[in-house]
Structure formats: structure tokens, C-alpha cells
Amino acid sequence: MVLTTLLLLGLLVGLAGSSPPPATVVCAHGTFDCTVSNAYGSFPDRTVCRAANATFPRTEKELVAAVAAAAAAKRKVKVATKHYHSFPKLACPGGSDGTIISTERLNRVVSIDVAKGLMTVESGMVLRDLIKKAAAKGFALPHSTYWSGLTIGGLLATGAHGSSLWGKGGAVHEYVVGMRIVTPAPASQGFAVVRELSADDPDLDAAKVSLGVLGVVSQVTLALQPMFKRSVTFVTCNDSDLAEQAAKWGKLHEFADMAWLPEQRKVIYRKDDRVAITSAGDGLNDYLPFRPNPTAALITARVTEELLEKNINAVARCKAANATVSLFERAAYGFTNNGSVFTGYPVVGFQHRMQASGSCVDSPGNTSCSWDPRTRGILLGNNGYSITLSRASAFIADMQQLRDRKPLAFCGIDAKLGILLRYVKASSAYLGKEEDSIDFDITYYRSFTKGEPNPHSDVLDELQQMALRKYGAMPHWGKNRNFAFEGAIDKYPKASKFFEVKGRYDSDGIFSSEWSDQVLGINGSPVIVEKRCAIEGLCVCSDDSHCAPEEGYYCQPGKVYTEARVCSFESAI
Ligand SMILES: Cc1cc2nc3c(=O)[nH]c(=O)nc-3n(C[C@H](O)[C@H](O)[C@H](O)COP(=O)(O)OP(=O)(O)OC[C@H]3O[C@@H](n4cnc5c(N)ncnc54)[C@H](O)[C@@H]3O)c2cc1C
Ligand SMILES: *[C@@H]1O[C@H](CO)[C@@H](O)[C@H](O)[C@H]1NC(C)=O
Ligand SMILES: *[C@@H]1O[C@H](CO)[C@@H](O)[C@H](O)[C@H]1NC(C)=O
Ligand SMILES: *[C@@H]1O[C@H](CO)[C@@H](O)[C@H](O)[C@H]1NC(C)=O
Ligand SMILES: *[C@@H]1O[C@H](CO)[C@@H](O)[C@H](O)[C@H]1NC(C)=O
Ligand SMILES: *[C@@H]1O[C@H](CO)[C@@H](O)[C@H](O)[C@H]1NC(C)=O
């Protein structure tokens, strides 16, 4: 994900003070009349999420009491986390009379079993703290998301992952060997119980990736590995054989991934393997887009980006993208060999310094994460979907055809450092991947104005419709806009097992919301049909009014996947 040259030039400026991310739960009166926002301050449908009240339990006992209070009153309840980095309205209880349980204060290590390599943490613990605490005892979490500002409870809920086809694979839930989850219960049991799920409990396959609809995860036990080092080299190649390489690359390197720059016709292959702990090197991954950004630079960058994005003529946008990519390449994407200077590949370092980053969570004064809504700098959309390994090559070939038809429309993707391809293995989790897959991740510019069309976004919509409909892609639960989730649950053969557990754990459905019911196909559809709905990704257009005919955007078939229906500005180049 990223930005413009201007912004990057400002990255090294340091200022005093402090602006970590804003609170996600804000209440008008004490713990009543609350709103819940994600880290970007914007949901796909741009509505505000309200809750009647919120609790911030500090212990499992307080957590049980909070669930019991909601269950006794049959009130809707949702879990919010410290930073709420999902894009959809997953943590919104719906209506305005629901309750929020925040895991912000459930952030401690419960125990570390050094002999067995097991670590138990409270569910609100932020990934970077978890990684640090494990490292202090000589252990590593073998795979994680690349962004470390997520909580363990939240990232598990959406099936979040890094990239690997080796061993158990790149998804964090594969390393979960136990959980404690608080669910509603009958009055005779005090309205709430703690269920302890051990490694051999089949319910763990429901609780590991639960979308938060089973209850509140109180604690998670992870199987760690002794600390190891890895060696990373980024190799840039042309993209002519990407379809073929993508099927192989993940088998060659344990932490392989690929960033594809469609307009530049380049692929940045991540050659990343475990090496002996004795290998020299103290490398650090402090990924550029996840560093603190000066507020002034963010505002300037946004002004520039808006000019480029709204311009029908894409050439300037492509030049800017090119400059950004060059800058990133030269800066080794934020990797350094010793924590301060990049001297060349490979970068060798300890797993806990290489696996994830997120220094903007500690942003000093007048700086912030680039997406901080208080700055009104960057506003991003994020599409993420996975396609089985056996079909991914054909999808890539189709994407390349579309690129060949409209190359300059892809510069917005290049500007955010391309489409990130990551490997995720088949999982026993009921809402995890059914087969070994490649996850395609695209970050893109989003307007602050609802319904404002973008001359180049038709390719994003065609790619996503092609992925979902032609290639049976599964949308990432924590990303995407509404239309992507229509029928998503039908792609999960083990969904009925998940619903069986949901029925037992939460028979009154207090952990269900309008959104989760729509996404899980329980009640209603996540699609919203209204004027300009396709511009916002709330629907797939079937009528010009779903686009912006007043501004020259009409509902048109896709260029390569002709079954797609996208909002096209015909004279756009
Ligand atoms: C910059 C950035 C980088 C990202 N990188 C990656 C990546 O590398 N890989 C990847 O897969 N994803 C990535 N994501 C997406 C992210 O992993 C998911 O959106 C993740 O679910 C967010 O975790 P969170 O802690 O913010 O949880 P939230 O978004 O706050 O919550 C997610 C869901 O979990 C529920 N929940 C949270 N805690 C609990 C609990 N204790 N018990 C029950 N339910 C709970 C919430 O109610 C909600 O339904 C990234 C997102 C951003 C913004
Ligand atoms: C932040 O910026 C404002 C003006 O842009 C300035 O007045 C203030 O001193 C700055 N604060 C810090 C801590 O740098
Ligand atoms: C939230 O409010 C409802 C009623 O308005 C009440 O039943 C519930 O106990 C409250 N919960 C907390 C934690 O205050
Ligand atoms: C891409 O690179 C391969 C070698 O890696 C080369 O054979 C091929 O000609 C290149 N294609 C283009 C279009 O440059
Ligand atoms: C992108 O920049 C490189 C130099 O960094 C240059 O060779 C290339 O022609 C540029 N491409 C475009 C489309 O501007
Ligand atoms: C990293 O290496 C550079 C030169 O190679 C050196 O100047 C710098 O002090 C080193 N930094 C650390 C933290 O070791």
C-alpha cells in the first residue's frame, strides 16, 4: 500500500509529541452513546456505527460479566479491538442499542511454557507486543500478517495471514492450539460461560476463524518455534512468465511472495528463507508505508493524488507511480541490514524483526499512520481475494490480457506497489481456505466523497468480478466492499459445521449483526442497490444509474471478462 513521492520524501522528518492511532470506541457520555470506527474512519457503505454502551474488561472475570449482562438482556454485542483494522462493518452491533466489548485492556501474556514452546495471551494483545514477548523468551511466531498493529483476537477472526506454502502455511490460525472463548449461556449457568478449547477439540476449527460471531475469545494459545533467522532478497523480473512462476515460487521459498506491477510489467519476487541462527546479520523490516508520516506531507500527498486520480488522462499518474516505485526499490522497501542502513541484499535478521512491522503505531507529534482519519490524508480501499493454486495461473493470464487492453489504467495499482500475491495453505478451519491458494491483495485510492466516480476504477471492478465469479475466489473477511461478499459463504464446504457450532454457542444470536447475517448468508444480502452503488462497490451495476451517467460513467461489460459489469468512462485512456 502506498502513496506518492512527495509523501515519501517527508518520511524521514522527525517531530516531537505524539499521535498514535485514534481510539476506535468513543462514547459521548462515560461509557454510553458510543460510536465505533475502524482505523480509517470509513466503512465501505460510509455509515456511522453506533452502540448504546461499551465495556472495557481487564480480566476474564469482567469479560464473563459483560457477556452475561448482554445475554441476560438479549442485547446485540460485538467485540471491538484497540485499533480496528478491518475494512468491513464486522465490529458493528447494528442499530444503536447494541453493546460493545472492547479487548483493549485484555493485553497481557498469560503464560509461556518454555519446554513445550507454547504461549498463551489475552485476545486483545497487539501482534507486535506478542512477537516481542515471545522473542524475549527465545521464541518466534513462524508466520504473521505483515502489519503488526493488529490484535491476535481480531486477526484470527478474519483468517489473516502472511505468506507460505511450507509446513502449516502462512495463516496465523494454523498455529493456534488452544482458546478460551466466552459465550452466552442459560440463566442457570449465569448467562455466560468460558469454553476451553484444546488442540483436539473440533470446535477449535470454528473458533479459530470466527468473524467474531461465536462469542468473545478471551485467550489464545499459540505453538511457537525456537527463534530463527531469515534471509530476504527482493528480485525484480519482467512479468512475461508470472502465470507460470506464481505456481512454483511458493514451493521454492518458505516465505515467498510476489508484488506485481502490471503497468511496469515487472514482478518483485520475495526470495525469503529460513537460515541458520548463526548466520551474520541483524536486519530489520520497517516497511516504508507503515512508518510515521508528517501530517503536512500527508495532506500535500493527498492533494496531489486527488489531482492525478480525477484526471482522465492517465499519463501523469503513471509517471508518479513510476517515481514511487523507483524510490521504494532504492530504499529496499524499508529493510535495513543492521536496523539503520541498507547496504545490500540479502538482508539477514531474526524472525521477530523481519516478519511484520508498524512503527507508525508509535507516531511522534505531527506524524501519524498514513491512513489516520484525523489528518484527512490518504484514504484507501483494499480488495483481497484468494484463488486456488490450480486456477491462479489462468487468472493471472486473464489479468495480463486486461492490462494489455488498458495498460495505463493500472498505474494506480503500481503506485501502491502493485498487486501483492501471497500463499495461504488449505486449512481445517471451517471458514479458512479449502485448498492451497494465492491471495491477491490490491490497495487503491478512495475518494472522500460518496459516489464520486474514478476514471480508472473500472479495471479494479473487472478484476474482482472475474476473480469472484469466474475463478471462485474467496474474499478476505477483513477487507473488500459489500458486493464481494454476496454468496461468499457458499464457497466454504464446511460452513454448515460452522453454523452448527454457532447454534450451540450463541443460540439467541446476540453476537450476530445485520452485517454478519448478510455476509454469512443467514439473513439478507450485503449488496445495497441505490444510485451510484457500483461506484462505491456496494453493488455490481445493472443499470446506468448505479454508475454516474451525469458525469459520463455508464454500466458497461468488462473488456476481458465480458460477464463483468463495470462503470466505465468511455473516453478514458
Ligand atoms: C495496514 C494493514 C495491513 C494488513 N495486513 C494484513 C496482512 O498482512 N494479512 C492479512 O491477512 N490481513 C492484513 N490486514 C487485514 C487485517 O488482518 C484484518 O482486517 C484483521 O482482522 C484486523 O485485526 P484487528 O485486530 O484490527 O481486528 P478488528 O478489525 O478490530 O476485528 C476483526 C473482527 O474480529 C472480531 N474480534 C476481534 N477480537 C475478538 C475477540 N477477542 N473475540 C471475538 N471476536 C473478536 C471483531 O468483532 C471483528 O468482527 C491488514 C490491514 C491493514 C490495515
Ligand atoms: C505541529 O504543527 C503545528 C502547525 O502545523 C505547530 O504549531 C506545532 O508546533 C507542531 N507541533 C509539534 C510537536 O511539532
Ligand atoms: C448497557 O445498557 C443496557 C441497557 O441500556 C444494559 O442492559 C446493560 O447492562 C449495559 N451494559 C453495560 C456494560 O453497562
Ligand atoms: C523477460 O525475461 C526473460 C528472461 O528472464 C526473457 O527471456 C524475456 O525475453 C523477457 N521478456 C521481455 C518482454 O522483456
Ligand atoms: C519509469 O522510470 C524508469 C527509470 O526509473 C524509466 O526508465 C522508465 O522509462 C519510466 N517509465 C515510464 C512509463 O515513465
Ligand atoms: C549500521 O551500519 C552502518 C554502516 O554500515 C553504520 O554506520 C551504522 O552505525 C550501523 N548502525 C547500527 C545500528 O549498527
Image (cartoon, rainbow, N blue to C red):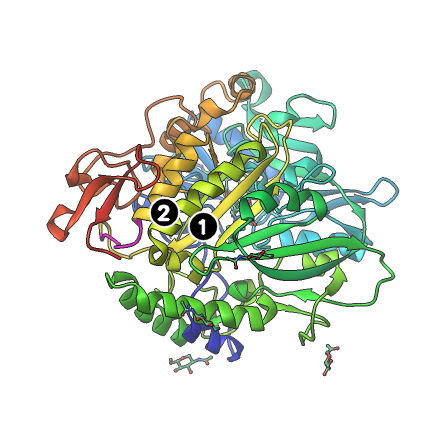
Determine the image quadrant of residue 166. top right
Determine the image quadrant of residue 335. bottom right
Looking at the rendering, the stretch of residues picked out in magenta corresponds to 452-457
**Residue 375 seen in the current view:** no
Secondary element at tag 1: strand
Residue 205: x percent and y percent? 63, 26
What's the residue type where badge 2 is placed?
Leu
Q: Is residue 505 above or below residue 122?
A: above
Q: Is residue 476 magenta?
A: no
Q: Who's the residue at 31% across and 51% down the image?
A: 457
Residue 323: x percent and y percent? 44, 72
What's the residue type where badge 1 is placed?
Ile
Q: Quadrant of the C terminus?
A: bottom left
Q: Who's the residue at 23% across and 61% down the image?
A: 312
Residue 299: x percent and y percent? 35, 71
Q: Tell me if mark 1 has few (under 14), some (14-19) or many (20+) residues whose alpha carbon lies within 10 angstroms of its own.
A: many
Tags 2 and 1 touching, CB below 8 Å: yes
Quadrant of ligand 5 in image: bottom left
- Estimate the spatial distance between the alpha carbons at disc 2 and disc 1, rounded to whole Å: 8 Å
Q: Is the magenta region chiefly helix, strand or loop?
A: loop
- Name the residue that disc number 2 marks: 460
Determine the image quadrant of residue 563. top left
- Name the residue that disc number 1 marks: 442
**Residue 253 seen in the current view:** yes
Q: What count of labels does the image hold?
A: 2
Secondary element at tag 2: helix
Q: Who's the residue at 45% across and 20% down the image?
A: 508
| In the image: residue 451, left or right of residue 54 | left
| In the image: residue 353, left or right of residue 460 | right
